[in-house]
Image (tube, helix red, strand yellow):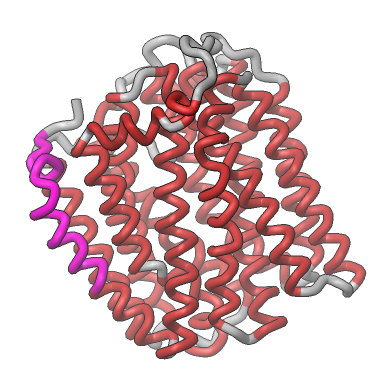
Amino acid sequence: MSPDSTIVPSVNTRELLRHRPFLLFFAARGLSSFAYQIAAVAVGWQVYALTHSAFYLGLIGLAQFLPVAGLTFLAGHAADRYPRQLVVRLCQMVEGAAAVFLAWGSFGGWLTVADIFAAITLLGAARAFESPAVSALLPGVVPEGLLQKGTALSSSVFQLATIVGPALGGLIYAISPAVPYAVMAVGWLLSGLLIGGIGVDRPVHPKEPPSFASLFAGVEFVRRNQAILGTISLDLFAVLLGGATALLPVYAKDILHTGPWGLGVLRGAPAVGALLMTVWITRFPLNRRVGLRMFQAVIVFGAATILFGVSRSVPVSIIALVLMGASDMVSVVIRLSLVQLRTPDEMRGRVGAVNFLFINASNQLGEFESGFTAALLGAVPAVVLGGVGTIAVALLWMRLFPALRNVEKLE
């Protein structure tokens, strides 16, 4: 979901924003991203308030990941065979309905932890279909030759939502737990309406009949390309071990002694780093030794995770999270650039689904791993050990995937 910042052409941004299909896509992506980021804070804080358990915080990630793991290949297949805007719209309608349920239950005072987990499992299933379709839809809503600029603008609104959304979610949660869920519902429902108005410039027509082989064609494509396999698996294991963000409610409440608004600020800090790094890479492209640069960035991510783990100061913790977001963005840019440049359009849904599966495995299983480890050892040891593990994985992958280490340019 980040731009291929290394090859963004110099074009007039206003020209792209006047293009109606992309403008609708851009606005819909912004609303959906804000809704999801608000959900991350509201659900985490409410579950911790009800259970006071780091383990349950970890289960939030697992509840979102399991439907992704089970539905990924069907989702990629759907994105390559059916109108992508229709797939996205239906998913956002489902997400809006889940948010209405959470708002209703919170307002009525009858919402239980089991209810919350049922809703976020449904959200995970909807996102399993939505994300590959969104990724594959983008090339069809931008004029020819403006794909890189469109990707950059799409990523910028996502990063803005990741910065502002958590802080807004924490602020309005202080009013009432029902308020952030109501805002989420409005965001997803409006996003679905905007997506429904898109007329795709270059719709995809499947070139092969449905079959078991075509369903898993994305896996075979990734397996054959060692550079793509290496970078996706590196992200999987590095972020899996370094999933400190799942424990932010614990740090905010019990270690840094702040409230919901402080949790929102901490949640948004990695996105600040990611957005700053996006601007930097756009201005100073990664044009040599990009494989090695990615490994270096993962090592910095691990070191910043360790710093966050031992910090007892809110400013130091924010700095560490900003560094984590900035270094992670380098890995994201390289991974998505490789996938985008080497995947034919008729396979973008299936390859995007594989990539989404790896991303969710790293983020959401990482949350489960962090919650489980924190329940056994405590929050601080869990985060510090995760950072050490991330650095170890980066060093090991440098030896296992020399083709990735030796990637010189993104071409």
Residue 223 visible from this viewpoint: yes
Expressed as whole percent of the image width and height from the top left, the position of residue 405 reads 11, 45
The residue at 68%/25% (across/down) is 86
Q: Is residue 319 magenta?
A: no
Q: Quadrant of residue 21?
A: top right
Looking at the image, the residue that sits furthest to the front is 212
Q: Main secondary structure of the magenta part?
A: helix
Q: Is residue 343 above or below residue 327?
A: above
**Which contiguous range is marked in magenta?**
389-408
Q: Is residue 50 above or below residue 121?
A: below
At 40% across and 67% down in the image, what residue appears? 243
Compared across the picture, whether 123 is left or right of 371 comes to right
Q: Is residue 334 left or right of residue 188?
A: left
Viewed as shown, does residue 361 lie left or right of 43?
A: left
| Rendered-image quadrant of the N terminus | top left
Task: State the image coordinates of residue 284 (x, y, percent, origin top left).
Answer: 20, 38
